[in-house]
Amino acid sequence: MGPYLSAARSGARRALANPAELGVRVLFYIVVLVVLVALWGAAAEANGGEVAAYSFIALAWYLMVAEASVIGTKPRLIEQIGTDIGGGMVATEMLKPISVVSWRIASELGEAGARLLCAAVSGAVFITAVAGPPPHWGALGLALPSMLLAVTCIVVAQHLFGAISFWLGDAKSAWYLFQKLVFLTGGMLLPLQIFPPWLETLSWALPFWTMAYAPARLASGHLEPWILAGQLAWLAVLAVAAGIAFAAGERRLQVGGG
Amino acid sequence: MFALTLKTALLEAWTARASFFTQVTFMIVNDLVFVAFWFLFFNRVGEVRGWDAARTLTLLAILATVTGIALGLCANARHLGEIISSNELDAVLPLPVDPLAYLLVRRIDTALLGDLVFGPALFLIFGEPTWERTTIYVLVSLCGAAVLISFLLMLGSLTFFMGGRGEQVELGFQAILILSAYPIDLFTGLTKVIMFTAVPAAFITGVPTRLVDDFSWSQAALLLTVTAASMLGARALFRAGLQRYRSGASWSRA
């Protein structure tokens, strides 16, 4: 575990060593919250105080946590992985006596964890000020580990999607696809209960709900511990798939030359 | 001269044809997700403060057209801060052209050209186009693009005075883009004041959409005044900044 913990630590230090970038990201996150709280506040107001059984306060906490989970990770990581594969950086990393994909995931998780902490703290202060305290403290307690799992699922899935570059040489299209899947079927802007039944069913069948909806649902006051189990199960699937994809890709690099 | 520079930039993008079509297609798919979002939202929530799906999609059509022009055709508007901080201006200043105008048309962003296809198409489908509405849509989109470019240039020019790598441009860009993407009547109080002043998102989509739906000369005059003032302000700030610029003796391609 030594090299991976060390990678996570240096990832966290990297995030904290760039306060300008971190500050811009947190400020952007607050701007997003201002807009989304205004949107859903107006929506709740137009519907007698709640939408799809979410009160305004529940929606505000939902959005705060859903956005924090996504904002913690690098938006263009998939594209960067593609560039690193195409540019030969991954081939160089393969010379190290470690698992390349695990090392990269650990490094990104360290970075994402630091950003998630800053975003979650500032977001919680902002939402408490504009909407009120969380609807259910117990559920919010579960939302904290769920946010960590959500960020982990995102980072692992980004590596899975980025691995397509071993074959295509570029991951830009995979990045677009992933982003939109999290955006819509991940419940980043809309709770899944808002969807028509067919889209809600589809969203449950895909792993993206573990990345935004899961912690957000808990933070909105729904004490549903099974959500954590669902996240863990999907994380295992994603991790195995990312490991297999990278192993196959690395073999391809070895055969073809990096 | 500037038409030729823009043509060269377009030809550069067109050279990698497969990449060109892929990027444009993905941007259109990206925009379609927002269309889906608004349909899902209004399907569940109904009309909100006078805004329904059709009106909001007119707003989205204007926003896509504005970003297609401002960020697709004038891609450097968003990168002025980086250009200044990395001394890339050195390559532009000796040229016998207006450096700001040259910089603006020197580079295009292929992906965002997808917005230039998507915006008008969305307007034709959902914007209830008549000759009058279409003319207003075109004119207000041009004004919105000018306001957005000017705003980004002003933020970029601050790099002359503040140093740094132009981080303020990215924050301002993200803020104005997200504030422009939602109906203006959702916002009240300080946020609305900010949208009409410091982060002029109201003049990117809010006032333009109002003009397309319900034209008034007073609103049109306001938009034109703000557009002209933004352009003059951006130019003045860039020129003032240039006085402070010191060459990095770096010869590169801006």
Image: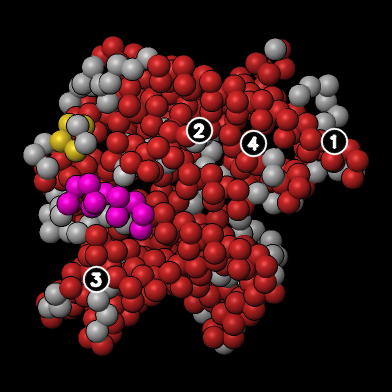
Label disc, if present, on residue B208 of the rendered structure: 3
Do the residues at discs 2 and 1 belong to one chain?
A: yes
| Pointer 1 residue | A251
Magenta region includes residue A76: no
| C-beta proximity under 8 Å, tags 2 and 1 | no
Residue hosting label 4: A160
Q: CA distance from mark 2 to mark 3?
A: 40 Å
The answer to which image quadrant residue A160 occupies is top right
Indicate the quadrant where residue B65 lies.
Answer: bottom left
Residue A181 appears at what percent x and percent y?
48, 44
Above or below A100: residue B145: below
Q: Chain of mark 1?
A: A
Please tell me whether mark 2 or mark 1 is closer to you in this view.
2
Q: Is residue B136 visible?
A: no
Mark closest to the chain's N terminus, 1 or 4? 4
| Residue stretch rendered in magenta on the structure | B35-46
Kindly identify the amino acid type of the residue bearing the numbered disc 4.
Answer: Leu
Q: Main secondary structure of the magenta part?
A: helix
> A242 or B9: which is nearer to us?
A242
- Residue toward you, B116 or B236: B116
For disc 2, the marked residue is A207
